[in-house]
Amino acid sequence: MLARRVIPCLDVHDGHVTRGVQFGRAEDGGLRNVGDPVELAVRYNEQGADEMVFFDITATAHGRTSMVGVIERAADQCFMPLTVGGGIRSVDDMGIMLRAGADKVSINSSALANPDLVRMGAEKYGSQCIVVSIDCKRVAPDRWEVFLAGGRKATGREAVAWAREAVALGAGEIVLNSIDADGTRQGFDLEITRRVGESVGVPVVASGGAGSLEHMAEVLLEGRADAVLAASIFHFGSYTVRQVKEHLASRGIPVRLP
């Protein structure tokens, strides 16, 4: 069995890492300043993180320049793969981030607006570089819908169907974010994670809801995820990456221990 990955996520706003609850917005006062993204990346690299995700939530030209600098500095100081997302709307945007030092680019709303972007990115840079991130919310007992704009805009797209389409277009990985669970620290949405994982032939990264060591184990065992992504439990010192990995190993889950 392949080793399962533990991936810290850094939401970057105007050059600083922030954290919200259920996709809180800066303009609503829903974000907390956590610290410098490169300092945090180095810390998690030393703790044994398998990868690092940087997500640019500024979505401005200034933010893009700032994020390129963040990726360049992080790539210079860290030895784990880096993924960057947020505001990537073209193949050229992908190239900018990959040349800055990212190993993967993550696209979300731009993929929904232009699904061919997934195919074009995969053809130019390889599927291993293209991650499609899906923000979903349970809208009925047996239906999860894809949302945009931080969970404020419904798309009418069913989450499992969109994941299948994204992979068919060339996505090499799916990051599945539960809007209902995001930032609550009450556990991952195991059901939708399992459904997506059983429906696609690429790795699925579970995101949204990590609050305990056992939450991580549950989504890997019961949710059939290939990796876990978390922010709050790392940023606010609840656990280190090493503690997560040691717990997973104790549950019989294969991980790379630092």
Image (cartoon, rainbow, N blue to C red):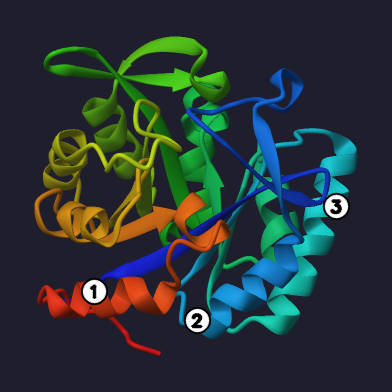
Image-based side of 73 in relation to 128, left or right: right
Q: Residues within 10 Å of mark 3 (few under 14, many from 20)?
A: some
Q: Earlier in the sequence, mark 2 or mark 1?
A: 2
Q: Residue at x 52, y 63 (%)?
A: 237
Residue 126 position, x and y percent, is 47, 61
Q: Residues within 10 Å of mark 2 (few under 14, many from 20)?
A: some
Task: Identify the residue under disc 3.
Answer: 66
Residue 29 position, x and y percent, is 72, 24
Q: Residue at x 35, y 49 (%)?
A: 210
Cα distance between the residues tagged 2 and 1 = 14 Å
Q: Residue at x 65, y 77 (%)?
A: 42
Q: Which secondary structure lies at badge 3?
A: helix
| Residue 231 is at least partly visible in this image | no
- The numbered dot on residue 247 is 1
Which residue ends up furthest to the bottom in the rendered image?
258
Residue type, label 3: Ser
| Residue 83 is at least partly visible in this image | yes
Task: Identify the residue under disc 2.
Answer: 47
Q: Decide: is 79 above or below 41.
A: below
Cα distance between the residues tagged 3 and 1 = 36 Å
Image-based side of 48 in relation to 33, left or right: left
Q: Residues within 10 Å of mark 1 (few under 14, many from 20)?
A: some
Q: Earlier in the sequence, mark 3 or mark 1?
A: 3
Where the N terminus falls, by quadrant? bottom left
Residue type, label 2: Gln
Image-based side of 101 in relation to 169, left or right: right
Residue type, label 1: His
